[in-house]
Image (cartoon, helix red, strand yellow):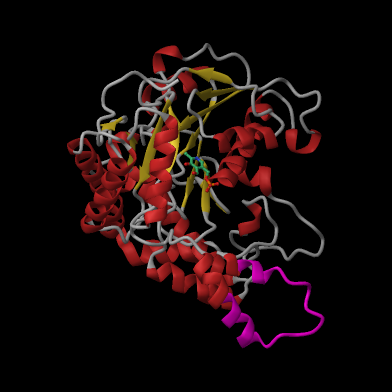
Amino acid sequence: MAALASLREPFPPGPTDPGAVLDLLDRVGSPGTVASAGPRFFGFVTGGALPATVAANWLAGAWDQEGGMEATSPTTVVLEEVAHQWLLEIFGLPAGTGVSFATGATMANFTALAAARGAVLERAGWDVEADGLQGAPPVRIVVGEEVHPSVRKSLGMLGFGRNLALVVPADTQGRMRADRLPPIEGPTIVCVQAGNVNSGACDPFGPIAEWARAGGAWLHVDGAFGLWAKAAPGRSHLVAGVERADSWATDAHKWLNTPYDSGLGFVRDAAVLRRAMAMSAAYFPVPVGRQPDHYTPELSRRSRGVEVWAALKSLGRTGLAELVEGCCHHAARFAEGLSAAGLEVLNEVVLNQVTVRVAPDPATTDRIVERIQREGTCWVGGTTWREVRAIRISVSSWATTAADVDRSLAAIVAAVRAETASGPSPRRGGRTP
Ligand SMILES: Cc1ncc(COP(=O)(O)O)c(C=O)c1O
């Protein structure tokens, strides 16, 4: 890592040979990267990058297309249209649903919630795109207790404030409690979740959709990784009813295993998404077909849909189902191995997330995490969930095998043994303060 400091040089007064630039980048830069594309990186839901998507990324990079306009990249437009239709099929979303190829789930949430804001205020007789929020009828926002912070951030960027939402309590797995939903009054946007970052649990979409529809509320789903459960027949029951929402956000760079950065926002009525995102200028060519930049916050953008298409084309329906199911199997294998070693798995392992208590106190837990990361067999991170300091294991790479899980399990258990005097026995004892 010390070598990285050598990159901190003054701006070169003259040119450097491009070959020498690349050589420096690889020699000094490569050792300073984290092997998050590898099969034993379980720290965050990063996914790996499927070989076809990496190569597609290089090719699209070499094309250097302005991917926002039909006039500047016909290939991008066609590939994104094809991927769009395939994605609607995978997620079971209705025809007519619009898509935004965004940078990640944060921006996908933002984009879909911008459409939601426009729609609920239009119903209340207010044009927020033209007139802004000042003087607009108040919009009530409802979130679950364990909403992802990127949803709060998106709400903040949209002028709703990060902290003004009404919070519905969660159950023991972090799911929004359908028996604690508030009455709906006036323009309302409800944000639910497919895939809790600690448990992988999904909110009960059926009853929530029923309640939202009866009250005329807009229902938005943050499904950064959990929405992909829909692609695996053995897991799709976890997101039953999710298709009844009005908008959805997910990531391609997580479970679809495309390179960064790649998120997907969907809005049931494409025209509503377009109204929130499109702009025009006299010098813009008039598009004949779908114009990508009419659906994204950015005007100029890279052709990120190319990698989404490459992932879906290379996997096909069965390959995608196997990718998702395989990660879930590996997560279950982790949970079994950790339990067998005497450790307390804190969540019901239904998807790809395992949260495990490895020590009776936060300081020891953090030392164990550090030891695992330093030893280098695998990479896991820490979390605090329901007041317990724990290790969080996320399985989302196409490259992970059962052998990787077993090697990682051995490394985790060894680290726990090394840091705890009497070996792994944190199953007993109350919650940490
Ligand atoms: C549930 C959930 N929502 C939203 C996000 C934000 O996604 P991104 O980092 O792609 O913006 C994440 C990322 O970890 C997530 O897990």
Q: Which residue is drawn at 32% across and 46% down?
A: 415
Outermost residue on the left side: it is 340
Return the x and y of residue 376 as percentages of the image width and height: 37, 57
Q: 74 or 156: nearer the eye?
A: 156
Taking the image as drawn, is residue 295 in sight? Answer: yes
Return the x and y of residue 61 as percentages of the image width and height: 57, 73
Q: Quadrant of the C terminus?
A: top left
Q: 355 or 103: nearer the eye?
A: 355
Task: Report the side of 87 relative to 220 (left or right).
Answer: left
Task: Report the side of 39 relative to 425 (left or right).
Answer: right
Return the x and y of residue 339 as percentages of the image width and height: 21, 35
408 to 38, vertically: above or below: above
Residue 6 is covered by the magenta coloring: yes
Q: 207 or 165: nearer the eye?
A: 165
Task: Report the side of 207 relative to 138 (left or right).
Answer: left
Q: In which quarter of the image is residue 243?
A: top left
Return the x and y of residue 14 as percentages of the image width and height: 80, 84
Task: Report the side of 188 relative to 83 (left or right).
Answer: right
Residue 15 is covered by the magenta coloring: yes
In the image, the segment drawn in magenta is: 4-25
Q: Residue at x 39, y 48 (%)?
A: 371
Q: Residue at x 54, y 73 (%)?
A: 60
